[in-house]
Amino acid sequence: MKGTFPMRTNHKAMKVLSMTFFMLVAVFAVKAQMAGGAAGAAGYSKAYEAAGGSAASKQVQQKMGSVLKGAVNRSVTAKPRSAPAARSSRGRQTARPANRPQTTATTTYRPDPSIDVAHTLAYSIGTNDQEKELLHALFVTTKNAFDVEVAKKGRSNNVSAAFTFFIVSSSMVYHGSPEPSDKAVDALWDALDESLQELPEFAQMSDRDKQMLSDTLVSLSGLMILGHPQYNPSLDKQTQEAYREIAGTMIRTVLQTDPEKLRFGKDGLIVD
């Protein structure tokens, strides 16, 4: 699926994030927010762990390491597939080989407009009013840009899309690497979709759980990506290193993987 996930076509979205960031940075010192490295990252990890809150959500979070490895193995040999219609109530509906188990879950969810993850996350992470306002604006901008891009592909409100965005963002920031190819990102998204659908615990997640998990991942991705020199070239080395440390901690927490072993190669995502 050429361009299914918009990292390469998402320059406009990333520019919007950067513009918002630079307007807000006038009233808030980013270095202060990023200072402390591991200490700051611990707060983001706790925020992720609290996403959803149900027993099913916890179980899915605890198995993301194995889900990721399974998805990587699939993505290496996966063939591109077409996205479903935008109004589909399920994840991708595709024919599967006879030896592949039928899915019992869907990676899409029905969103509840009363759930405000951006506000909850910002107020749990921020240490003063200025930080909370800055983070809230960043999270809202990130989510809006993300929603616009995935809607173009007919795959809105999709948990695997949020995980893909998180993986791409955290890997880029940690390694200081360029955007992976559309082909690599598309294959990863498709493979994550299948792996999550086949996870029994994922089938037990409610729409609320999925939305909170997805929105948390998207918000944290927006925070991390601003530590990449491609989108925020004015950051000094010390601040970039603080972002890198946060990205590494988040990779360990969310993906249960050594960040040194997770990277995009010419053929797609690699997890050694």
Image (cartoon, rainbow, N blue to C red):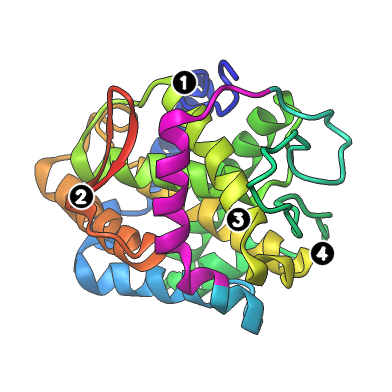
Q: CA distance from mark 2 to mark 3?
A: 22 Å
Pointer 2 residue: 261
Is disc 2 placed on a helix, strand or loop? helix
**In the image, residue 108 above or below residue 104:** above
Cα–Cα gap, marks 4 and 3: 26 Å
Asked whether 60 or 213 is in front, the reply is 60
Q: Which residues are magenta?
A: 60-81
Q: Nearer the viewer, mark 4 or mark 1?
A: 1
Can see residue 127? no
Q: Please report whichever mark, 4 or 3, sits nearer to the chain's N-terminal start.
A: 4
Say which residue label 1 marks.
Answer: 182
Q: Where the N terminus falls, by quadrant? A: top right
Circle nearer the N terminus (2, 3): 3
Q: Amino acid at mark 3?
A: Leu
* Picture quadrant of residue 206: bottom right
- Could you say which disc has been placed on residue 196 in the image? 3
For label 3, the SS is: helix
The earlier-in-sequence mark between 2 and 4 is 4
What residue type is disc 1 on? Asp
Viewer-nearest residue: 141 or 173: 173
Q: CA distance from mark 2 to mark 4?
A: 39 Å
Q: CA distance from mark 4 to mark 1?
A: 33 Å
Residue at x-position 69% and y-position 62%? 210
Q: Residue furthest bottom?
A: 55
- Residue placed under numbered mark 4 in the picture: 114
Q: Amino acid at mark 2?
A: Lys
